[in-house]
Image: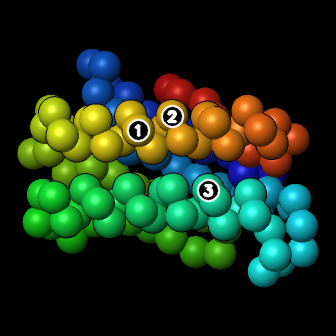
Amino acid sequence: MIQVTVEQKNDHIISFTMNGHANYAEHGSDLVCAGASSIAFGMVNAISEVCDFDPIIKKSEGFLRYTLPEAYIKNETVQILLTGMVNQLRSLAYSYPDHIKISSK
C-alpha cells in the first residue's frame, strides 16, 4: 500500500511523504503506483517551474519526501498547487482504498 502523509503548519502544507507500493498489479504495470507517482512528481516539477528553484526531495525505490523551502510556504500559488495534488491523491485513494491512503499531521 502507498501511504501519503501531508505535513501542515499553520494551515499551510510544508511537506509530504509518499512511501510504499500500491501492489495493485505487477511492477511496471501498476496503474495506481503510476498515477500516484505522476501526481506527486508532476506537482514537484510544477512548483519548481513556477517558482524557479530546485526541489528539496529525498527519493528511493518506493519513497519520496518533498519539503517546501521556507521562503515559499506562504506562497498562494504554491499552496494551491499542493492542495490540488492532495485532492488528486485523495481521488485516487477513493477509487483504490486498498492501495493508497492519505493522512495529515
The three-letter code of the residue at mark 3 reads Ala
Please give the name of the residue rendered at 89% of the width and 67% of the height, measured from the top-left corner. Answer: 25
Q: Residue 26's quadrant in the figure? A: bottom right
Please give the name of the residue rendered at 42% of the width and 62% of the height, measured from the top-left corner. Answer: 42
Residue beneath label 2, please?
A: 87
For label 1, count other residues whose C-alpha is less than 10 Å away and answer few (under 14), some (14-19) or many (20+).
Answer: some
Q: Is residue 27 above or below residue 80?
A: below
**Numbered disc 3: secondary structure:** helix
Q: Is residue 57 left or right of residue 104?
A: left
Please give the name of the residue rendered at 52% of the width and 50% of the height, measured from the top-left corner. Answer: 17
- Of residue 6 and residue 85, the one placed in the foreground of this image is 85
Residue beneath label 3, please?
A: 36
**Label 2 with label 3: CB-CB less than 8 Å:** no
- Sooner in the amino-acid sequence: mark 2 or mark 3: 3
Q: Is residue 62 left or right of residue 72?
A: right
**Label 1 with label 2: CB-CB less than 8 Å:** yes
For label 2, count other residues whose C-alpha is less than 10 Å away and answer few (under 14), some (14-19) or many (20+).
Answer: few
Q: Is residue 50 above or below residue 80?
A: below
Which circle marks residue 84 in the picture? 1
